[in-house]
Image: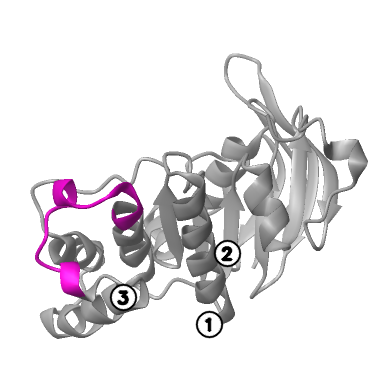
């Protein structure tokens, strides 16, 4: 599903964000990417989304080589991805239904497809009764559920969540993570970038830890020993 082969990323200002990254994420996996600020988490996510290209090495996503992907093929890559951000990025002048439908309109889905898919996506995240409500009438957790429905409505094979619970309280954060786990169990590959140690430990999924642009740990079950109590790989 995702493969990094000897990847290095250097920005124009000379900053090396990633160095010698080798990583494979298989279809159907749920993977947490963790690390302190500046560790390379955001750059890794941007490479998967092709917001950035690697300086060296190869990034393969859903069979597409990011480095050599022609511009006219980028929309096809992104249609296979669902993206969820920390700040929700909802359209405030559109209802919940319209926000989710908008993601389908962008990829030129037919009205019939939209009428079928949007209610299904809202039901999946528990918001069927909120379809006609506007974002400012929702709680933070509900807004993040709308963002999840929007990311899922086009049936992506890969869901990427970048700090999806950063603005939510712990209880709501865990609810969102459990929802992501349910989505994963339906067959969607899930990658979550986060710094919230308690959630990572509770979920017991594969954990890839970054520090100073390098992978310092790749652990299958997300269970940490005493050496991690100082939270250095999170904060």
Of the image marks 1 and 3, the number of the one nearer the N terminus: 3
Disc 3 target residue: 121
Specify the segment rendered in magenta: 129-142
Residue at the location (64% across, 68% down)? 1
Say left or right for 78 vs 27.
left
Q: Quadrant of the C terminus?
A: top right
Residue 161 visible within the image? yes
Query: Residue 76: percent from the left, percent from the top?
Result: 41, 65
Whether 137 is among the magenta residues is: yes
* In front of the other: 122 or 114: 122
Asked if residue 65 shows in the view, the reply is no
- The structure residue drawn at horizontal position 11% and vertical position 60%, both measured from the top left corner, is 133
- Which residue is label 1 attached to? 186
Rounded to the nearest angstrom, the CA distance separating label 1 from label 3 is: 13 Å
Residue at label 2? 190
126 above or below 223? below
In the rendered view, tell whether residue 28 sits above or below residue 60: below
* Disc 2 packing (10 Å; few <14; some 14–19; many ≥20): many
Q: Is residue 203 above or below residue 182?
A: above
Left or right side of 205 for 139: left
């Amino acid at each position: 599903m995702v493969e990094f082969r000897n990847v290095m990323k250097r920005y124009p200002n000379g900053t090396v964000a990633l160095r010698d990254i080798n990583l494979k994420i298989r279809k159907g996996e749920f993977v947490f990417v963790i690390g302190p600020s500046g560790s390379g988490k955001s750059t890794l996510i941007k490479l998967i989304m092709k917001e950035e290209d690697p300086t060296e090495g190869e990034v393969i996503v859903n069979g597409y080589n990011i480095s050599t992907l022609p511009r006219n093929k980028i929309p096809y890559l992104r249609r296979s991805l669902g993206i969820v951000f920390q700040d929700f990025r909802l359209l405030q002048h559109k209802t919940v239904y319209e926000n989710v439908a908008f993601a389908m309109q962008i990829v030129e889905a037919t009205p019939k497809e939209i009428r079928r898919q949007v209610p299904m996506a809202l039901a999946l995240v528990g918001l069927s009764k909120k379809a006609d409500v506007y974002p400012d009438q929702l709680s933070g957790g509900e807004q993040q559920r709308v963002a999840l429905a929007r990311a899922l409505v086009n049936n992506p094979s890969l869901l990427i969540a970048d700090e999806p619970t950063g603005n939510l309280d712990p209880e709501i954060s865990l609810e969102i993570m459990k929802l992501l786990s349910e989505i994963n169990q339906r067959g969607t590959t899930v990658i979550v970038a986060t710094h919230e140690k308690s959630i990572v430990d509770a979920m017991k999924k594969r954990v890839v830890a970054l520090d100073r642009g390098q992978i310092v740990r790749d652990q299958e079950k997300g269970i940490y020993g005493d050496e991690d109590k100082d939270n250095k790989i999170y904060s």
